[in-house]
């Protein structure tokens, strides 16, 4: 069985981002790979509310299209501002609320 070699993608985000209730905040996600960025690149943002054990997917970019998950409190307030060709997977969350406190994770996959 032939195993194809894998190489890592380095993903960079700000450790902490602060925003004011009612304003907006940019969650920046940049990445670097020694490999060519393929057409199949995917970017997923997850959110884990403060004090919660569960993480939910709130945004997905795949096959050249951004998909904002149509569940949860972010669906009407999220904007895709990334550009995978520039190695950028950033999103903006508008109209911030106290309930947005938590951990946001940016996950980038560049198959094969």
Image: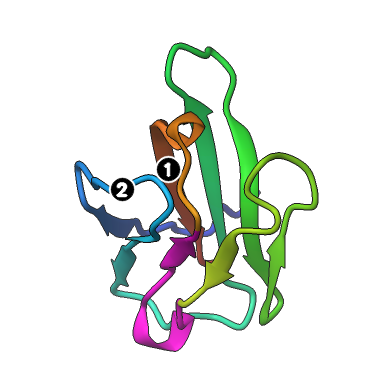
What's the residue at 42%, 20% (across, down)? 50
Between 8 and 96, the one lying in front of the other is 96
Name the residue furthest left.
15
> Quick check: 40 above or below 27?
below
Q: Where is residue 32 in the image (x, y as percent from the top left)?
A: 28, 70
**Is residue 84 inside the magenta stretch?**
yes
Q: Where is residue 52 in the image (x, y as percent from the top left)?
A: 52, 14
Looking at the rendered image, the quarter that the C terminus falls into is bottom right
Q: Can residue 112 be seen in this view?
A: no
Is 31 left or right of 89, judged from the image as shown? Answer: left
Q: What residue did someone put label 1 on?
A: 105
Please give the residue where the numbered disc 2 appears in the rendered image: 20
The answer for how far apart the CA atoms under marks 2 and 1 are is 20 Å
Q: Residue furthest front?
A: 22
Q: Where is residue 73 in the image (x, y as percent from the top left)?
A: 66, 41
Q: Nearer the viewer, mark 2 or mark 1?
A: 2
Q: Please state the extent of the stretch shown in magenta in the rendering.
A: 82-94
Scheme by which the image is coloured:
rainbow
Q: Is residue 71 above or below residue 90?
A: above
Q: In this view, does 101 lie above or below 109?
A: above
Quadrant in the picture for residue 87: bottom left
Mark 2 crowdedness (10 Å alpha carbons): few <14, some 14-19, many ≥20? few
Q: Which of 7 and 83 is in front in this view?
A: 83
Q: Position of residue 9 (x, y in %)?
A: 35, 60
Residue drawn at (53%, 50%) of the image: 45
The picture quadrant where one finds residue 67 is: bottom right
Identity of the residue drawn at 34% across and 56% down = 8
Looking at the rendered structure, the secondary structure element under dot 1 is strand
Mark 2 residue element: loop
Q: Which residue is drawn at 56% across and 69% down?
A: 79
């Amino acid at each position: 069985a032939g195993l194809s070699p894998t190489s890592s993608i380095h993903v960079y985000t700000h450790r902490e981002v602060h925003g004011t209730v009612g304003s907006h905040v940019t969650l920046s996600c940049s990445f670097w790979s020694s490999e060519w960025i393929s057409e199949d690149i995917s970017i997923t943002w997850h959110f884990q509310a403060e004090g919660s054990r569960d993480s939910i997917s709130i945004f997905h970019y795949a096959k050249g299209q951004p998909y904002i998950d149509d569940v949860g409190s972010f669906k009407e307030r999220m904007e895709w501002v990334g550009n995978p060709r520039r190695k950028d997977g950033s999103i903006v969350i508008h109209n911030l609320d106290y309930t947005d406190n938590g951990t946001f994770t940016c996950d980038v996959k560049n198959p094969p």
